[in-house]
Image (spheres, rainbow, N blue to C red):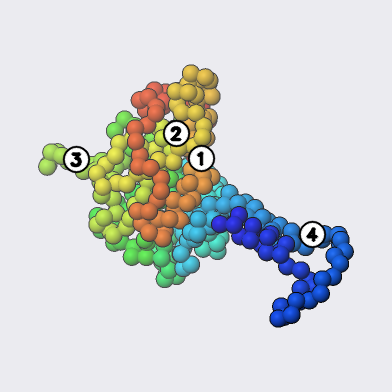
Amino acid sequence: MPILLAGALWFGGLGLATDERPVTDAPAAAEPVTPTEQTPGPLLPAAAVIGSLLAALAASRKEPGGALGLRPPEDAIVVFVPGHGQGSGPEVFADLIDLMDLDPDDARFFDYRLVTGGADPITASQSASIEDTTRALNAFVGGVAAEERPIWLVGFSKGGATVANLVADWDDGVYGPNNSVEEVFLLDPPIAAGLHGWLQSVGRAVGAIPDDGGYDPVACSFVVWGCDDEREHLGEAAGVDVLVIRNPNAGITNLNDFPDGLRVVDAPDDGPGFWEQFWSNAIGLPARVAAAHESVLDDADVASCLVAEMGEPGSCPLEPAGPQRVPAPLLLGAIGVTLGPKVK
């Protein structure tokens, strides 16, 4: 359609003469035609159209949600919860906020110093336990709810595990559900169970393993001889929608088991998968895992997913999660402990 419009403006301009005269019944006498130098006037409308198209293309690369006609709701507040060992929230989530086309004035940032009382946000995020952080986050969200606007929560890594734990407590009636919260998004969260989950708890101290703050989703009882996985149908009792967005290339940093009723989608980055990296450069594997883990913070597809979900839950265009392209978590954890920098 822009090409047709440009063509119409082009040919319409060429057909317009500045000295055209009204049509009369009697034909006017023929006048000698004097060649005149053509002016580039008719080119201006076409150039303007082309310039608009280029501007739109640039906007689509910078603001994928905006280019698709998607914007966060005008009255929305988004609460962001960073991960282990990260700095201030505005710095951690700056790229994602820009990609979402979210007004920075509509963003709120949880600070782990609310848990520990320390002066350094990085140290606080490393030492805060999952239960203490959950209580502090519940109080923080309660304060934000006083603004009487709808709230969406975005938790990355350990922040995602904390948000998951909070929603589970809302389900169980520990705090009572926060009626202002519409949906929560867990970005590459370390919320696995079993051996995989144990390794994520070990990540509080060592290697290229994420820190889940001690999060354990499965509780077993010998009285009823059974186990309960709080991730199953997470948020349903509290009336809160939950979406997990993971990068399958990161492997150990998220989850590979899919509890019933938990919606999980994949957001792979453009880097090599586990085996590609392993066979080409095993020494660089931990750094590759870290990069894959943090890629969800600067991914246009993730941003578009969040904005779409804020408009209509269930509308995220990312593909449902499939099997991870990594070996057993134990192998990945051993390599990470031995070789790697910390994953946040």
* Mark 3 lies on residue: 227
Residue 160 in sight? no
Q: Secondary structure at mark 1?
A: helix
Find disc 2 in the rendering and name its residue.
250
- Nearer to the camera, 178 or 274: 274
Lower sequence index among marks 4 and 3: 4
* Callout 2 amino acid: Ala
Contact? badges 4 and 2 (CB < 8 Å)? no
The residue carrying pointer 2 sits among few (fewer than 14), some (14 to 19) or many (20 or more) residues within 10 Å by Cα, namely: many
SS for tag 3? Answer: strand
* Label 3 packing within 10 angstroms: few (<14), some (14-19), many (20+): few
The reply to whether callout 1 and callout 2 are in contact (CB within 8 Å) is yes
Q: Are marks 4 and 3 in contact (CB under 8 Å)?
A: no
Separation (CA) of disc 1 from disc 2: 9 Å
Q: What residue appears at the point 53 percent right and 20 percent down from the top-left corner?
A: 281
Residue that label 1 marks: 295
Amino acid at circle 4:
Pro
Q: Kindly report which numbered mark, 4 or 3, lies closer to the viewer in this rendering.
A: 4
